[in-house]
Image (cartoon, rainbow, N blue to C red):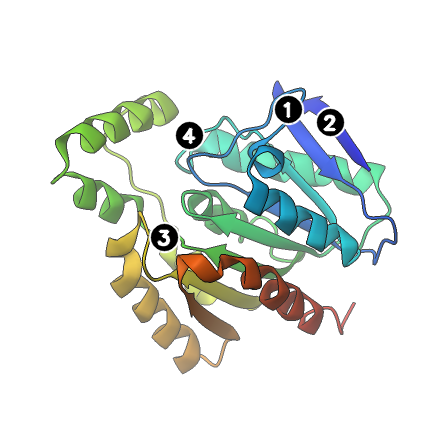
Amino acid sequence: MLRTLLFDQQWCMLHYPEQPNGFAIFIIGDQQHYVNEESSFWIDNMGRKQMIERLTQAGYFVYYSNLFEKNWGNQQSVEHSYNLYQLIMRKEILNQKIHKLAEGMGTLTAAQLIPLMEDNIRSIVLFAPCISLEKHIEQEQTRKFYYKKLMKEIKAAFNEESVHINTEKPIEEMKESLFIIQVIDQNRYKDQLELIHQLLLKRKEKKLPVEIHYILLENRQYITEKIIRFLKENEKVL
């Protein structure tokens, strides 16, 4: 079952499983993510639609918001996400500790939610993550058209061009399990790889749970099963 709702002037989509397992997944999308009154990127894109179908078949309640589209992790997206979580928990019968699945740009918002929701996060999955906005801006400087477009989006999101978001530290220090999925042959955030490697090392040094999986774009269809396996491993303690 599918339901849409308008919350904080943003369309949100809720996917209900036929046989609920009691756990929720909050998806925070990348640059191409959108939700409107009738559809969403996760319905219109065949690969993403199949992912949602498989997650709901496994019993998960899945939800996401339009989230101001190209928000680049601004405060508005963080506050909206937190308030949406509170609304969902009031309206649905679910375990209070949720899974988060963030892709690309969505990592910037997901990371800032960690200190706000430290008692309500079960695990986090990062798909081809953008951990550092500053690093991404630096990467795009060599591509004039994309750089100009990016800076226009950032100015619209923050009302300024110089932005610093503390995202690496919350991800590095969070106690919950972290699963990173990296696409080897097509990744718009390729300059983030060194940061990700450093993040992995720091979490391992602190003996914090972390796992990384590298895939080729052509093997994307297998990733959902790996995600489900990871989620279930983190549901043993309610």
- In percent of width and height, residue 207 lies at 48, 81
Give the label on residue 4, or none.
2
SS of the residue under disc 1: strand
Amino acid identity at mark 2 = Thr
Q: Is residue 226 left or right of residue 106?
A: right
Mark before the other along the chain sequence, 3 or 1? 1
Q: In this view of the protein, which residue sits in the foreground, 114 or 220? A: 220
Give the label on residue 131, or none.
3
User: Which residue is labeled 1 in the image?
Assistant: 11
**Residues at marks 4 and 2, CA–CA distance in whole angstroms:** 20 Å
Image quadrant assignment for residue 30: top left
**Residues at marks 2 and 1, CA–CA distance in whole angstroms:** 7 Å
Cβ–Cβ under 8 Å for marks 2 and 1? yes
Residue 171 can be seen, yes or no: no
Q: Is residue 120 left or right of residue 180?
A: right
Mark before the other along the chain sequence, 1 or 4? 1
For the point 53% across and 29% down, the residue is 34
**Residues at marks 3 and 1, CA–CA distance in whole angstroms:** 26 Å
Quarter of the picture holding the N terminus: top right
Give the label on residue 70, or none.
4
Give the label on residue 111, or none.
none
**Mark 3 or 1, closer to the camera:** 1
SS of the residue under disc 2: strand
Mark before the other along the chain sequence, 4 or 3? 4
Q: In this view of the protein, which residue sits in the foreground, 70 or 224? A: 224
